[in-house]
Image: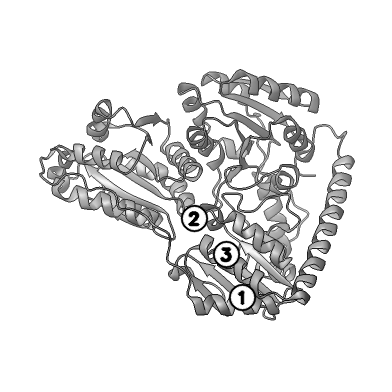
Amino acid sequence: MRGREVLMNSLVAQGVDCLFGNPGTTESPLLDSLADHPQITYYMALHEGVAVGAAKGYAEASGKVGVVNLHVAPGLGNAMGMLYSVLKARTPMLVTAGQQDTRLRLREPVLGHDLAAMAAPVVKWAGEPANADELRLMLHRAFTIAQAPPAGPVFVALPIDVMEQETEIGTQPPQQWHDRPQVSASGLDAAVAALLGSTAPGVIAGDNVATARASAALVELAERLGAPVWHEPLRVQAAFPSRHPSNQGRIPFTAAAVCSALADRDLVLLVGADLIPELWFDPGPQLPEGARIIQICESEGRLAANHRVDIGLVGGLADALSRINNQLAERGDGAFKAAVADRNTVLRAAQEAQRRRDGEALRKVWDARPMTPKRALHEISIQLPPEVVIVDETITGYQDVEALFDFRGPGDYFAGRGGGIGQGIASALGVQVALPGRPVVALTGDGSAMYSIQALWTAAHYGLPVIFVVLSNREYRVLKHNIDLYRHRFNVPSNRAYPHMDLTNPTLGFVEMANGMGVSAEQASNPEALAAALRRGLASGKPYLIDVVVSGKQ
């Protein structure tokens, strides 16, 4: 068989049913082979970053490895920013790119480059087969590494002549994945003893909880401990229900703020890895020195990577949390259970108080015109059906999204990680492909939308009924907040204007852009118009864009 047959049969064997890409000449062997593999649907994007973003959303929503096909050096270069976000999100992905004929390598052909070296900084592993005989093992290794904790993207370059070479080494069956190794019994016993002895435990949970299908066990643990639960500041999924009394929202972006938020905790349980990404430098530790730190992690290499850990456990999260819950139930005495009941009562009271504060904050801006983002997001939240999936890139509006929407667990919410913008509307494509029976709404800002606006064409071309809601404040609002922080931290005079952060003169025409790519669209500048637009969009069964005019930074 030829190399391209090894590639396509390997994808089928791995359960790949869709592929996202932007075609080019060196991708001809793959594109021409698709007709012989109707079980794989190809979704074309008009920019490589959109293809990677869509595959990211698909992988996260489906639980499968996302697969992307790019075009040589410029195509891979266009995808690098989104690939960085995939790496930081720990999303399993196989990224391929067509490569020039290896016989031209020394002649420096058009579009030629060392693609594996180019991809290496933003993937877990990168390679290029020297001949068709290497394809089977290389693809097997790629899928294995992509899924091994911590999951992430891998890269394989596909030279056009290698794809056409003959080989007798065919497809390797996929390996059977079983549960992750269990945490040690002694470590588990030490962790449970520490939890039973804590009078003020707290939990920080990562996306790993969602991908490990451990959310239900985490909810049970929070209730068995009477513990508040924070999640990482740049989260990809909803690992914990947004309206649970224990939910405290996102942990802050700076070490000092994290220590302040956890100041009254005598024990902090970290569930996952890399949970405290910092935006600004603060001297001192990431976690309060007076608290005992326990970490459960699926990857030994990420255990205690950036902070001290007193008790470290490596193993599957779902199994570890379930075993901890069982031991707490067996070993907790009457005094422990009474203390837990008191702590849960305090958490419920704090939640009610926060809801009252949120309601008062909303009432204060209820009649403001233009609408504030908070008022617009409230209107959106009450119009959408309960089975909706939110893909969130509101950035400065994330706290309002979390307060106003009911995310019950994994599958209800998807977002970006890494800090790069433009992930939202691209990712929504893949989420809709993975979850065709659920309505998908992408919430984004105008600045973020412009990084991957070509995604609208793909939505129209394949009939993906995503509702794209663009909150147009006509500025890079997050940068205005951050320059305020910069000026404060570095003692810079703060009476200056915000440089190069306004999206005006001209104002972006999202309705016109959407129409030009085959997507119906309208603008909404008040709550009534927004509500009506959402109803029309949902009823259409087609991709729909709503340009929502909201206020900027006051």
Q: How crowded is mark 2: few (under 14 residues within 10 Å), some or many (20 or more)?
A: many
Work out whether mark 2 precedes mark 1 in sequence or the reverse, and give the earlier one.
2
- Of circles 3 and 2, the one toward us is 3
- Return the x and y of residue 296 as percentages of the image width and height: 54, 69
Q: Residue at x 55, y 53 (%)?
A: 210
- Return the x and y of residue 93 as percentages of the image width and height: 39, 47
* Element marked by disc 1: helix
Work out whether mark 3 precedes mark 1 in sequence or the reverse, and give the earlier one.
1
Q: Residue at x 79, y 66 (%)?
A: 341
Q: Residue at x 59, y 53 (%)?
A: 235
Q: In this view, does 363 lie to the left or right of 101?
A: right
Q: Which amino acid does label 2 sit on?
A: Lys
Q: In this view, does 445 lie above or below 113?
A: above
**Dot 1 corresponds to which residue?**
192
Q: Is residue 331 left or right of residue 41?
A: right
Q: Which amino acid does label 3 sit on?
A: Leu
Q: Can residue 239 be seen in this view?
A: yes
Q: What residue type is labelled 1?
A: Val
**Dot 3 corresponds to which residue?**
321
In front: 162, or 76? Answer: 162
**Dot 2 corresponds to which residue?**
88
Quadrant in the rendering for residue 385: top right
- Return the x and y of residue 521 as percentages of the image width and height: 62, 21
Q: In which quarter of the image is the C terminus?
A: top right
- Return the x and y of residue 540 as percentages of the image width and height: 61, 18
Q: Decide: marks 3, 2 in contact (CB < 8 A)?
A: no
Q: Decide: marks 2, 1 in contact (CB < 8 A)?
A: no
Q: Residues within 10 Å of mark 1 (few under 14, many from 20)?
A: many
Quadrant in the rendering for residue 503: top right
* Element marked by disc 3: helix
In front: 397, or 435? Answer: 435
Between the residue at mark 3 and the residue at mark 2, the CA separation in whole angstroms equals 24 Å
